[in-house]
Amino acid sequence: MHNDGDEMNDDLSALWQTQPVSSIDLTAVKANLRSERKKQRVFMVVDSLALVPALYMLYTYWDKLTFTVQMINLFILVFAIPLLGYQLWLRRVAAFSKDTQTLDHLTQLTKQIKNNVKIAFITKHSAWSAIVFGAVFFAERYFSQEVPPEKLVRMSLIIAGISVIMIVWGVWAHKRQQRFERQLNTLQEMANHRP
């Protein structure tokens, strides 16, 4: 004896089984992984080189900085260097992937896109934290009264410009995070429908 709930489940099951199953375009997945490999290698170099000017500036001007500014910069470095290491580690999946079995491409691409979501999340939060550190730096310079007013005006314009860039960068990173999340969902669905 069937009740209404069983009949509904049977109907849903029949409907589910009649749904078309899209096949995985393994050539496209392989091409995406190859493209991702190149991008991740370039990003690894750019991420690593981005630290060089900051280290050079600190080395060159360390003696001219106040103790507070030195501590702010040390605090940033203490977090930036391990964060750089973490981002490089997240990029490794695609950057050092080998041409293996075709089905492994989908797995590797899925792992890298999952890591890209994390990288975009870090980038998004790095943007607003850079604005905060810029404001703290400016406040320290202003309240220390060691900087002439004309330099403060120039410094405020530079920090305002950098803040606008960071806002745009944060919005861009947020949109990338959302795009990677959608891409990850698509890849996971493809993997779930794999024969």
Image (cartoon, rainbow, N blue to C red):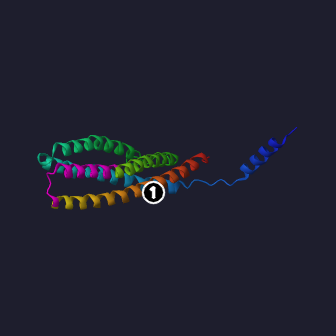
**Residue 134 at x, y percent in the picture:** 27, 52
**Residue 125 at x, y percent in the picture:** 38, 49
Residue in front for this viewpoint, 147 or 117: 147
Q: Please, what is the dominant secondary structure of the magenta stretch?
A: helix
Of all residues shown, which one is farthest toward the top? 1
Location of mark 1 (residue): 175
- Name which residue type carries label 1: Lys
Residue 175 vs 103, above or below: the answer is below
Residue in front for this viewpoint, 129 or 100: 129
Tell whether 48 sits left or right of 6.
left
Screen quadrant of the N terminus: top right
**Disc 1 on helix, strand or loop?**
helix
Query: Which residue lies at the image location 16% right of the left edge and 42% below the top edge?
Result: 67
Q: Residues within 10 Å of mark 1 (few under 14, many from 20)?
A: some
Query: Which residue lies at the image location 75% right of the left edge and 51% below the top edge?
Result: 15
Query: Which residue lies at the image location 14% right of the left edge and 46% below the top edge?
Result: 62
Of all residues shown, which one is farthest toward the right? 1
Tell whether 177 sits left or right of 69.
right
Numbered disc total? 1
**Residue 41 at x, y percent in the picture:** 34, 51
The magenta stretch spans residue 142: yes
**Residue 107 at x, y percent in the picture:** 50, 45
Task: Report the span colored magenta.
Answer: 129-149
Q: Quadrant of residue 163?
A: bottom left
The magenta stretch spans residue 78: no
Query: Which residue lies at the image location 26% right of the left edge and 57% below the top edge?
Result: 159
Residue 51 vs 171, above or below: the answer is above
Of all residues shown, which one is farthest toward the left? 63
